[in-house]
Image (tube, rainbow, N blue to C red):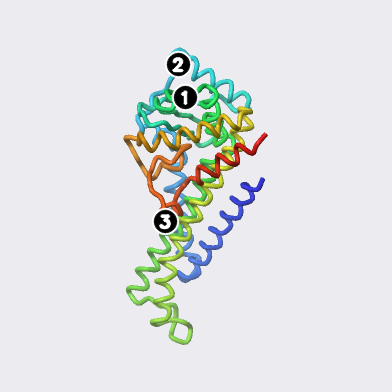
Amino acid sequence: MMNSLKTTMLLSLLTVLLVLMGGALGGQGGMMIAFVMAAVMNFGSYWFSDKIVLRMYNAQEVARSDNPAFYGMIERLATKAGLPMPRVYIIPDQSPNAFATGRNPSHAAVAATEGILRILSPEELEGVMSHELAHVKNRDILVSTIAATFAGAISMIGSMLQWGAMLGAGRGDDEEGGGLGGMIGSLAMAIIAPIAAMLIQMAVSRSREYMADATGAEICGKPRALAAALGKLQSASQMIPMEEQRPATAHLFIVNPLTGGGLMSLFSTHPPMEERIARLRSMR
């Protein structure tokens, strides 16, 4: 419940930021143009997300006859979650990781790397795949697409403001805040607002990860198994990084396939692993 409320608040902040940016641009016209452009790009990606990301990682679809144990596990967990059976894929990569994609539960796919199938116990793998099915159940692909649309529109408006400020396009005369003061204000908003929007978008993603952990633990009924799996994945994925590291799809994976700490943690799509594990271990 708290993570759902947090997501709603963060999306509301993005909405307010978009309106403020639209006002700074000089009206609703530019705001609507940027929003429509961002919506077309992001929802086009959302509609075809399964095909795009699965092809990116050379994921191979498997049937029951190809891997009866893994396929049967997904089938059992999907039934427990009240979901249609998703398509099942294996990624030919030794780095242990997994993700879910698809625009809705009826068009979902779950994928696991060869590495994760190799290092996790059956109970730990159940926890991981329950987490991925939780993303499907919670419609996280849709939520992240909405956040990306707002952030993308704000970024576009920021670019418009930067060009307007550099070309001396103030908002009225000096008495109304135009001139040099208006140009500096526009430049400041053009730089700060897109960064703020990106941080909010990352916070939405982190909130959905916590929710998927909780929902996944409920699906499999073994929160400690998922906690143990996350601990293994954290260390193993650093020792064996993914062959293909794509920032645009990092948020999909159960463990961030990208490396970086310090200031970069602000821009991480995943919450701290220690906190995720602690929350799961506190569940009964």
Residue lying furthest top: 65
Query: Crowding at label 3, few (<14), some or many (≥20) Cα neighbours within 10 Å?
Result: few
The first of marks 2 and 3 along the sequence is 2
Q: Mark 3 points at which residue?
A: 263
Snapshot quadrant of residue 161: bottom left
Q: In whole angstroms, how far apart are the C-alphas of marks 2 and 3?
A: 42 Å
Counting from the top left corner in percent of width and height, residue 136 is at: 55, 34
Question: Closer to us: mark 3 or mark 1?
Answer: 3
The first of marks 1 and 2 along the sequence is 2
The first of marks 3 and 1 along the sequence is 1
Q: In whole angstroms, how far apart are the C-alphas of marks 1 and 2?
A: 10 Å
The residue shown at (48%, 56%) is 199
Q: Mark 1 points at which residue?
A: 88
Counting from the top left corner in percent of width and height, residue 121 is at: 50, 23
Q: Mark 2 points at which residue?
A: 67
Badge number at residue 35: none
Disc 1 is placed on an element classified as strand
Residue type at mark 1 is Val
The residue shown at (55%, 29%) is 127
The answer to the question of whether label 1 and label 2 lie on touching residues, with beta carbons closer than 8 A, is yes
Decide: is 15 above or below 260: below
Question: Closer to us: mark 1 or mark 2?
Answer: 2
